[in-house]
Image: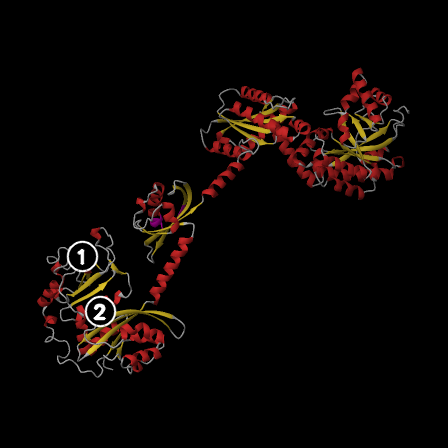
Amino acid sequence: MSIAGDAPRPTSGPIDSQRSPSLHDPDRRLDVAFAALGEVPTGAFGHCLGPGAGSTGLPPVLGDHLPTCRWTPSHTHPLRFIDPSDHLAVHHAWLEACHGPDRVGRATVRAIHPLAPDDGGEPGPPGPYDVVLIDLVGVVDLDAVVIALVPSDDLAGPEADGLGALAEVALGDDLGFRALAEALPVGVAVLDERGGVRFANQGLLGLTGDLGITDPEVIATATGTDGYIAAWSELVSAEFARGAAPVLRPRTAGDPAASGRVQVTGPDGTVHHLVLQAVTVGDAAACRVIVSVLDVTAEVATVGAHNRLTQVVDGVDDLVIVTTADGRVTFANQTARRLLGRSPVGIQVTELPQPELRRLLGSAIGPAIDRHQVWTGDIDITDAGGRTRTMSTTVTPVEDPARHAVQVGVTMRDVTRERAHARELAQQARHDLLTGLPNRLALMEALEDRRRSGPADGRIAVFFIDLDHLKIVNDGLGHTAGDRLLNAVARELRAAAGTDLLARFGGDEFVIMVEEPGETLDERADRYLAAVGRARVPGVASHLSASIGVATAVRRGLDPESLIRDADAAMYVAKRAGRGRAAHFDDALRDQVRRRFEVERELRAAVDDAELTIELQPVVALADGAVRGFEALCRWDQARPSEFVPVAEESGLIIPIGEQVLRQALAQTARLRASLPHLADAGISVNVSACELDDPSFAPRVLDAIAASDIPATDVVLELTESILIDPRDDVAATLRRLRDAGMELALDDFGSGYSSLTYLRHYPIDILKLDITYTRAMATDPESRIIVESLASMAERLGIRVLAEGVETPAELAVASELGMTWVQGFLLGRPASVADHLTSGVPSRRGLVTPR
């Protein structure tokens, strides 16, 4: 259809050279252009569009005419419109410039205009501006449109109704208008003076199709104010008709331009946001209304999403800042404004009030952009209230598809409490809670640090200090008194150590690490022994001593674990030498340690392969010389018991060894009882270490082994080492009572060799005392020893405890044992340990010929 419909065309016809001589008169066009811009004030902005723009953006032909205008090429610094509908206003002005008689178009917009690069890139203030467009096509070989962006209040140029040019096109150049309208990225319609639609471009038809209008010819039937409102109401919605009424109403020549916004719900439920603009062109004889429609639904959604996102980001506790690639802050959430005491938007990060923040962001943004990587780290800042806060910070470059950073996001989370808690945990992890001293972990880390630093040939000394008999204080006065005494020792050792590292290694053990000791090691050890001896606690009458092991190493070959192990080994040498002294780790001790390691390794393999065996030594009754039973003694062909048993106890291997010995002893005793009638009631004694009694599964394992054998529990004796007396414990006593209640008897081995005291016997249900071999040998030659043994035997008898003298090797020793009323004897004189096969061969005869019956 014709966009003019049935209305008469202007008598002048289409736009041509007769109507507008400026079309073919470059001088005329240039004069008009200069007239339009002749009074542009200082400070106005200018754009040039098209290939005719020079490197500065200013066509050379205008350079002398507009010296006060600041220019920038629009293709590098486009206008940013605040209102999406302003795009339409510029399009209309562009139509005027390209098709109007004076080649000048004008529109008022709100926009943010960037300056030219040589002006620093500072963005101009938001409008309103008047946009004046001047077409210079064909002028001195230029092909450009010059845009002057002028604050509207300052524009003093001539009035130019450029939309008249559009009217001329719309009224007189049907083909040109259609082509122009179809090329525009917006919907365009031409209404007649009655409000009927005479033309709609594809952009509008596509849009109205979304709104439910499918036949533009129907729209053309709407005439008159009421008619067009009814038609638009019926075809779209009453909501659309009401919103569009100020723009789409019938208009007459001379009516001012109108604009408005309409919100319409389409048939599929989609809400559309439309911006409408209308301008009346022509005269009373031929009036037309050009309407442009822009769907800004996406822009509205974007703005809404941005606002919602801003609300969300404002509600978080993290500080959020967004900057440009060159560090200018463009966004700051509420937390950022609160912590910084102001809004940083618009300033450079190097201008922030917090110096720590300036340094960090100033140094982190650049590398993050250059390396295309996220930067993370902790920084301490002082907030607006003067508080120091630790902030976990992330700097994230935001890049375009070409990997050019366009923005930088900065997030900060206040982790002051978390970091303080972490430091507290780290302090606790490396310090002893009781004494406040560095603990084992801190000591090992310090040794490792010394290994990596300092001169390679530098020397490190370690003093391993173990308090003697602190357990007696804990047992006698309670653990609170023991803890107070430990603190007193720590204070004295700290003073003696000076700047050297003092650590509590565990329990009653302390370690001092000395770098490049200036005095002799013995002098230092004596100083530490004296410090322990000075430790006093009010109300605790205890004088402590210590055993110290000393070991040294050079940094080059330092192994912290080995150095501590060497010092620990030397400390045990000091203890075995009598306590209260120091011992050095030397080559001889190194050989002992190496041998011990070998013994443990081979012993472990022997246990796994069940290579350990037993020998049985007879126990003889003094009453008649009969063999009443045997003691099972563990044997290993790779080492003597005196060597491998201590290793087994220290390594924990004593537990599986003890079970193997018990099962072998039960089986072999059952074999003897079955083979030799006079041994039908023979019992069996097995040794039990303190380590085994600490194992909760010990009692069940013993009962299971006896239940699986042919030996009744009443014929089994468990021999306990005397060391358990130093640590009387309720759980151990309960275990022993359980076994005794099952029928077994309990014997205390080597009584008199160490911590012997009859007062200890009340803690455990002891049935038999085995007199240590030292008393057995002395009682026959030393009168005082005989008196002691006689008293011991008498007291044991009154307590219902029987006595066995072990290690009897001479008839004199046997005679004294009999005279003192002992129950049993055992020793080489009465029978050496032998295998079950040897006993079966010998028949295990009675020893009546040696014993004088009582």
Magenta part of the protein: which range?
Answer: 368-376
Residue 372 located within the stretch drawn in magenta: yes
Residue 389 located within the stretch drawn in magenta: no
The residue located at (32%, 67%) in the rendering is 296
Position in image of residue 676 (x %, y %): 88, 37
Amino acid on which disc 1 is placed = Ala
Residue 44's disc is 1
* SS under mark 2: helix
Closer-to-camera residue (184/347): 347
Q: Is residue 284 visible?
A: yes
Mark 2 crowdedness (10 Å alpha carbons): few <14, some 14-19, many ≥20: many
Q: Where 627 sits versus 258, above or below?
A: above
The residue located at (80%, 15%) in the rendering is 783
Q: Where 198 sits versus 35, above or below?
A: below
Give the position of the C terminus as an image quadrant: top right
Position in image of residue 233 (x %, y %): 34, 78
Q: Where 797 sits versus 287, above or below?
A: above
Residue 92's disc is 2
CA distance separating discs 2 and 1: 21 Å
